[in-house]
Image: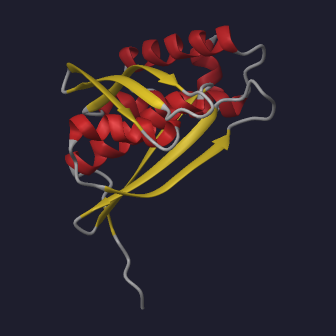
Amino acid sequence: AFKTKLQELGIELDSEEALNAAFARFKELADKKREIFDEDLHALVSDEMSNLEDRYKFVSQHIVTETGEEPRAQIVFSVDGVEKRAEASGSGPVDAIFKAIESVAQSGATLQIYSVNAVTQGTESQGETTVRLSKNGKVVNGQGADTDILVATAKAYLSALSKLESGAVRIKAQGNV
């Protein structure tokens, strides 16, 4: 039924591994949301397909925010299959996430854009985040999707780092004319 629904939406997965990974994510999402929309499936599959190719992969995170205290992020992610742990504080939880990842990645990239959009309506919607990084005149976008926007944020940053380092989907930064 899941594969048939994806085909109805025009989504073709090229391997059984990709289908199984997408279905596992679908089950996780179904546990978090009462109703899953077509837009959720598009975001889920897009996020999962990106993750299969990424050098940097999200594993888990623990974020602590408290009024009057500096937010702190503990991130676990893998680099080429090797698990890394990082921790940092920042001016907000998003800043703490980016700083924690950078403490390990040390990419030297500059954050150009960070945006969050709801995939569907309502409080149970997935958040889809976009992170744009630049380095040496090259610009890449990374996307992440999750019902927890801070998880989506970490996924998007890691996706952008993977693209920046792999040479994939690089766009020349446009100068002022």
Q: Is residue 172 visible?
A: yes
**Quarter of the figure with residue 172:** bottom left
**Quarter of the rendering containing residue 132:** bottom left
Quarter of the picture containing the C terminus is bottom left
- Between residues 49 and 56, which one lies in front from this camera angle? 56
Q: Position of residue 133 (x, y in %)?
A: 36, 55
Residue 146 in the image: x percent, y percent? Answer: 57, 27
Q: Residue at x 41, y 86 (%)?
A: 176
Q: How is the image coloured?
A: secondary structure
User: Measuring 52% from the left and 16% from the top, which residue is drawn there?
Assistant: 25
Q: Is residue 121 above or below residue 34?
A: below
In this view, 138 is above or below 47: below
* Residue 64 placement, left or right of 171: right
Measuring 30% from the left and 46% from the top, which residue is drawn there? Answer: 163
Q: Position of residue 128 (x, y in %)?
A: 59, 38
Instruction: Using residue 77 as the reference point, say whether residue 5 is left or right of it.
Output: right
Q: Nearer the viewer, residue 174 or 45?
A: 174
Task: Say above or below: 118 vs 175.
Answer: above
Q: Is residue 151 left or right of residue 124?
A: left
